[in-house]
Amino acid sequence: MTPEDCFPDALEQALKDREEYAESLQDLCDALKEDPLLVALGNARARKEAAETEIRQLLAYGREFHGGRPYKLEPLAEASGMSLSGIRTAYKDTELEAVALQIDRKPDSRRTRPPAADAARG
């Protein structure tokens, strides 16, 4: 079976899924008495924020938890669609803590940055 053979079935399923989503969105809006467009925009925003959080956590993992050699900035920038400086500042302690909790270990010690107050003193 080739991808071309699967296309009609995939298209049919996508159209069915879209119709079901529209119906469920309308039902939700009717129940809540809210504008369907605004609900859809809110849902899209939530997905976007979740994707941005995931990207920041993946960058933190690649730079701070990857073992002997962290990922270089260039491939991370290319894959994420960010600039090199954007990669350097993309994640904060919140993302480091979330990754550490998810993988049950601390960042690589040589990569761990001192807190800002300690860095200014020494």
Image: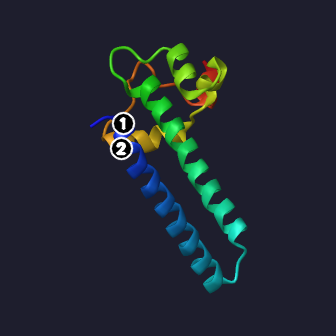
State the SS at label 1.
helix
Using the image, determine if residue 84 lies above or below residue 65: above
Residue at image mark 2: 6
Q: What's the residue at 45%, 21% (across, down)?
A: 111
Q: What's the residue at 46%, 23% (across, down)?
A: 63
Figure label count? 2
Using the image, determine if residue 118 lies above or below residue 84: below
Q: What's the residue at 42%, 31% (across, down)?
A: 61
State the SS at label 2.
helix
Position of residue 11 measured from the top left corner of the image (x, y, whole percent): 46, 51
User: Camera-side residue: 18 or 96?
Assistant: 18
Q: Residues within 10 Å of mark 2 (few under 14, many from 20)?
A: few
What is the quadrant of residue 44 in the picture?
bottom right
Contact between marks 2 and 1 (CB within 8 A): the answer is yes
Position of residue 15 measured from the top left corner of the image (x, y, whole percent): 50, 58
User: Camera-side residue: 113 or 117?
Assistant: 113
Please give the label number shown on residue 13.
none
Q: What's the residue at 56%, 74% (across, down)?
A: 23
Residue at image mark 1: 3
User: Camera-side residue: 97 or 84?
Assistant: 84
Q: How is the image coloured?
A: rainbow
Question: Left or right: where does residue 82 sit relative to residue 73?
Answer: right
The type of residue carrying mark 2 is Cys
Q: Residues within 10 Å of mark 1 (few under 14, many from 20)?
A: few
Using the image, determine if residue 117 lies above or below residue 35: above
The type of residue carrying mark 1 is Pro
Position of residue 42 measured from the top left corner of the image (x, y, whole percent): 66, 62
- Which of the image's four quarters has the C terminus? top right
- Which of the image's four quarters has the N terminus? top left
Q: CA distance from mark 2 to mark 1?
A: 5 Å
Position of residue 103 measured from the top left corner of the image (x, y, whole percent): 32, 40
